[in-house]
Image: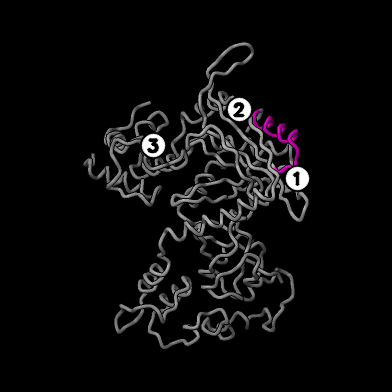
Amino acid sequence: MAATDDVQATVLEVLSGIAPEIDPKSVPPEANLRRELDLDSIDFQNFLIGLAKAFAIDIPERDAAACATLAGCVAYLRRPPSQP
Amino acid sequence: MTDFVMPVLGADMEAATLVAWHRQPGDRVHRGDTIAEVDTDKGVIDVEAFTSGVLERILVPVGTKVRVGTVMATIREEGTAVAAAPPETGEWRSPAAVKPPSALPTAAPAFAAGGRLRMSPAARRRARELGVDPAQVSATGSGGAITRQDVEQAAAAASTEVGGARVERMRQAIAAAMSRSNREIPHYYLETTIDLHRSIAWLAATNADRPVEKRLLPGVLLLKATAVALRDVPELNAVWDGGRVVHREQVHLGVAISLRGGGLVVLALHDTASRPVDVLMESLRDLTIRARTGRMKSSELADSTLTVTSLGDRGVDAVFGVIYPPQVALVGFGRIRERPWADAGELHVRPTVTATLAADHRASDGHRGGLYLDAIDRLLQEPEKL
C-alpha cells in the first residue's frame, strides 16, 4: 500500500486536472471538495473517474460519499474498496 | 468552389485570432475535420470544415484577428472544376510543382525572408503551427539555432496575458449579447415543479452496478427530456432571423457551462433528442472538460438551438434565464430537492426539480410554452423510455 503522502499527491494531481487554478497546498483536508472548490456534479464525477483510473480501481456509487473530502479520499484509497 | 468562412461562434463572440492552419493548400479535407485553430477569450477553438474537398487557397495568415463571416480559405468541392491555373494532375502533387511554404502568401514575413535563421525543420514547422515569428525567438540551440522548445517557449510567453484582461473582455462580450437579448426579445416566463421520484429511483437502480465512468447523472435525464419534449412544441427549437421564426429540424441543446476563471460558454450537445442517454452522458462529460480546459470545436459554439442552464449545483431552486440570441427559448433547472408532495390524496416526500422556461413571445405563446414544460414533466415520469 502506498504511503499517505503519495496517495495524497496523486489525489491532488487528479484534482488539478479538474480545477487547474487551485493551489494543491491550500486544499483543506476536511473541507467538502465540491463546496470548497466549486465543483459541479459533472466535475465531481470526472474527479472520481480520474481517481479510479489513477489507482486502477472502481469507486462504486455507494462509496462515492467517502471521497467528499481530501482526507476522506486518502483514507478510502488506502483501504481496499468495500465488497458488494 | 466554396468559401471557408470564420463561423459564428455564439452571440457573444465577434472575432477570433487565427493561431494555426492544420491543413495546407492541396490537402484533402472532410466535413468536420479541424482545418484551423483560433484563440478567443473563452479558449482555443478548433474550426471545422463544413464541406469536403481540397483546400485550394489560404487567404488569412496566422496571427490575424478574424471577424465572424470573413472568408479564410477556399475549398474546391469534389467533382467541381479547378478554379485556378494549377490542374489536378500528378505534376500538381509532385514536390517540384508544389510551392515551398515560404513562398505562400499566407506565410509570416519571417518565413518570406527564408533560410537565414538557423532552425530545424521541426522548429520551423512548430513556429508555423503556433504563429510564432522566428525572428522574435531567442535561440538556445547549438550554434545559435532555434529549437522546437525555444519556439514553444516564445509562444507560451506571448499567450500569457493577465488572466483578468481575458475575463474582462469576456464579461464585456456577454454584457453586449445579454443586453441585446433583454432589449430586443419580449421574454415571457413559466415555471413548474416536477416530481422526480421515478427518475431518481431509475437512476439509482441503473447506476448501482455500473463503474464510475458509466454512471448517469440526473442532469442528463433532464437534458434528454428537454430535447425530446421539443417534438411536441417544435416552434421552440428555432432561431429568430430577420423578423421571423426559422424552425430548426435537429435538436442540439446548448449547455451553459460556467468557466472556472469566470464567465460562461454555451456548447451544443449535438443530436440531443436522438442519442441514447449513455452516449449523451459521455458527450456531456467531454464537453464540460473541454470547456473548462479551453479546447472547443466551432460546431459546438455555433450549432445550439435551445439553451439549458442548470444552476442546481449552485444551490438555487429556480433560474429565470435570459435567452441566448438568436434562439427563442431557454430552459432552466434548479437544484433537485426533497419537498412534501401531494399525490392522489396522499402526502409524500419526493425529490423534485423546478423547471422554468424563458421564451420569446414573438416566436411562441404562453399556452404552447406551458404544453412544453408539461411534456418535459411527462417524459421524466418514464425515465426508462428516455
Which residue was labeled with disc 3? A58
Position of A21 relative to A1 (above/below) = below
Q: How many other residues sit within 10 Å of disc 1, few (<14), some (14-19) or many (≥20)?
A: some
Image-based side of B215 in relation to B178, left or right: left
In the image, the segment drawn in magenta is: B360-377
Q: According to the image, what is the colour scheme of the structure?
A: one colour
Tell me what residue is drawn at x 60 percent, y 58 percent.
B9
Q: Amino acid at mark 2?
A: Thr
Chain assignment, label 3 = A
Which residue was labeled with disc 1? B362
Image-based side of B138 in relation to B278, left or right: left
Chain assignment, label 2 = B
Quadrant showing the C terminus of chain B: top right
Q: CA distance from mark 3 to mark 1?
A: 51 Å
Image-based side of A79 in relation to B187, left or right: left
Tell me what residue is drawn at x 53 percent, y 32 percent.
B317
Label count reads 3
Q: Are tags 2 and 3 found on a single chain?
A: no
Which residue was labeled with disc 2? B193
Locate residue B33, reporting x and y percent. Answer: 59, 62
Q: Amino acid at mark 1?
A: Arg
Locate residue B274, reporting x and y percent. Answer: 66, 42
Locate residue B91, reporting x and y percent. Answer: 62, 83
**SS at mark 3 in the image:** loop
For residue B298, which quarter of the picture?
A: bottom right
